[in-house]
């Protein structure tokens, strides 16, 4: 299910970044007492009552015509356009200002749910004196203190009330959702059309042709149901012009969230780009299944050992994706695309694979015998047992005498041993190290 997107907007210095950091539980956004610190949009994921949401922090919207403020305003407008719900931040200390009224009028035109937050209400008197904010026309104002956390629970309750109802996961249990991600103009839409064998998505050599994420259902020859998500690229609205590569990364996040498996598309002609590494990192951190697709393979000169060289470059640049299979394809000729559905099915099955605890611990004992556990300051790591606790992705808990003694290199060794013993191609494994007591 798609994660709702929430944007925090308001005039400068009302505490947007402080609220952003509190809602995500991390100091990701820079906080300062002067205006204009947050210039670009900042994205992160938060959760409340078991519901996840993607949060966007924006720069303060000022009604002046200074060039920098206009750029910040443009960034905020893009965030509002992307968002499903908007938190409108004001401040109890200054009361309703002309800038607040201008922003309130603009938000009315978005036709999106708005939650009105009155920040810096640090004491009970301030929390009761918020009546003037009703004049902004966005419903009940929620007095909060983003620095102390007061009132944020009520604000989040109101926010979650606008989230779409959770769908019944059982209805879609057998449907495999996957997406194509990568730099602009690597052929993502062409791959969708070639896979479906019809012109379902607009294709152009101009970067950013795809403006919306398009979900398309189809059935493979094996009878398996799939949904392919074509990620959106740049969107231009009015005078808002966004850097293509930066914006397409942000648009890919939503597609990654909704996918079981992500196909990272690399252009064989241009090679690996920095953005490829960024979006691959997002997919990896989201614990998604991953396939690396090298598209336009028909367009390159097949010099001696080009296949081996390209494969080696990919493995060097994406060392953390050693589990991801590589497929060299061509959307133009259809080369090897017929292998993709079977590969997706295989990875999907691997993500739901369960291993009996007895078998797991036999492999664990063999691994320890082959490579004894490390020591630190005279103390040796003891591993008692391992058990699988979840699937999608496969998740295992390893019980030890002291988690501080588990070095990341030994943890990596255990993961590699599991991959050698069981078939987990295409999916990350999640190891949780815990003290036995």
Image (spheres, rainbow, N blue to C red):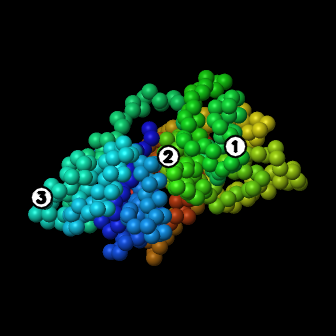
Q: Is residue 171 visible?
A: yes
Tell me the quarter of the image containing the N terminus.
Answer: top left
For marks 1 and 3, give the CA distance: 56 Å
Q: Earlier in the sequence, mark 2 or mark 3?
A: 3
- Going 36% across and 51% down the picture, which residue do you hit? 106
- Going 52% across and 50% down the picture, which residue do you hit? 237
For marks 1 and 2, give the CA distance: 22 Å
Using residue 409 as the reference point, say whether residue 154 is left or right of it: left
Using residue 156 as the reference point, say whether residue 397 is left or right of it: right
Tell me the quarter of the image containing the C terminus.
Answer: bottom left
- The circle on residue 254 is 2
- Crowd tier of the residue under label 3, counting other residues whose Cα lies within 10 Å: few below 14, some 14–19, many 20 or above: few
Above-or-below relation of 12 to 51: below
Marks 1 and 2 close (CB-CB < 8 Å): no
Q: x and y percent of residue 416 in the render?
A: 59, 54
- Residue closest to the eye, 334 or 7: 7
- Crowd tier of the residue under label 2, counting other residues whose Cα lies within 10 Å: few below 14, some 14–19, many 20 or above: some
- Residue closest to the eye, 130 or 158: 130
Q: x and y percent of residue 38 in the render?
A: 42, 67
Quarter of the figure with residue 334: top right
Q: Nearer the viewer, mark 1 or mark 2?
A: 1
Q: x and y percent of residue 280 in the render?
A: 59, 54
Q: Element type at marker 1?
A: loop
Q: Earlier in the sequence, mark 1 or mark 3?
A: 3
- The circle on residue 405 is none
Marks 2 and 3 close (CB-CB < 8 Å): no
Q: Nearer the viewer, mark 2 or mark 3?
A: 3
Q: Element type at marker 3?
A: helix
Q: Earlier in the sequence, mark 1 or mark 2?
A: 1
| Residue at image mark 3 | 128
- The circle on residue 204 is 1
């Amino acid at each position: 299910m798609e994660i709702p997107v929430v944007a925090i907007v308001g005039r400068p210095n009302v505490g947007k970044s402080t609220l952003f950091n509190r809602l995500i539980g991390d100091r990701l956004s820079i906080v300062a007492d002067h205006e204009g610190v947050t210039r670009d949009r900042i994205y992160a994921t938060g959760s409340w009552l078991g519901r996840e949401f993607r949060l966007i922090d924006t720069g303060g919207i000022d009604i002046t015509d200074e060039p920098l403020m206009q750029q910040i305003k443009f960034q905020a407008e893009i965030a509002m356009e992307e968002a499903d719900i908007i938190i409108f931040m004001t401040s109890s200390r200054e009361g309703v200002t002309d800038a607040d009224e201008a922003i309130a009028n603009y938000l009315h035109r978005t036709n999106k749910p708005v939650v009105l937050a009155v920040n810096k209400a640090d004491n009970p008197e301030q929390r009761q004196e918020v009546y003037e904010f009703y004049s902004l026309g966005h419903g009940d104002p929620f007095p909060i203190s983003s620095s102390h956390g007061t009132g944020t629970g009520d604000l989040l309750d109101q926010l979650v009330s606008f989230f779409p109802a959770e769908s019944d996961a059982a209805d879609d249990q057998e449907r495999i959702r996957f997406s194509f991600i990568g730099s602009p103009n690597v052929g993502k839409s062409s791959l969708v059309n070639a896979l479906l064998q019809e012109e379902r998505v607009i294709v152009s050599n101009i970067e950013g042709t795809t403006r919306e994420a398009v979900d398309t259902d189809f059935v493979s020859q094996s009878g398996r149901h799939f949904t392919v998500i074509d990620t959106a690229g740049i969107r231009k609205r009015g005078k808002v012009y966004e850097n293509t590569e930066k914006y397409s990364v942000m648009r890919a996040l939503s597609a990654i969230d909704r996918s079981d498996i992500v196909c990272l598309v690399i252009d064989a002609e241009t090679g690996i780009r920095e953005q490829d590494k960024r979006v691959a990192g997002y997919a990896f951190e989201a614990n998604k299944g991953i396939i690396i697709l090298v598209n336009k393979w028909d367009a390159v000169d097949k010099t001696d050992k080009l296949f081996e060289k390209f494969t080696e470059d990919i493995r060097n640049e994406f060392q953390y994706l050693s589990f991801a299979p590589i497929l060299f394809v061509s959307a133009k000729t259809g080369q090897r695309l017929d292998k993709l559905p079977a590969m997706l099915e295989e990875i999907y099955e691997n993500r739901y694979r369960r291993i009996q605890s007895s078998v797991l611990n036999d492999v664990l004992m063999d691994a320890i015998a082959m490579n004894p556990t490390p020591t630190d300051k005279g103390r040796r790591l003891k591993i008692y047992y391992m058990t699988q606790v979840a699937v999608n992705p496969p998740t295992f808990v390893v019980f030890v005498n002291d988690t501080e003694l588990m070095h990341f290199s030994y943890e990596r060794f255990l993961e590699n041993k599991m991959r050698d013993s069981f078939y987990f191609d295409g999916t990350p494994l999640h190891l949780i190290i815990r003290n036995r007591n």
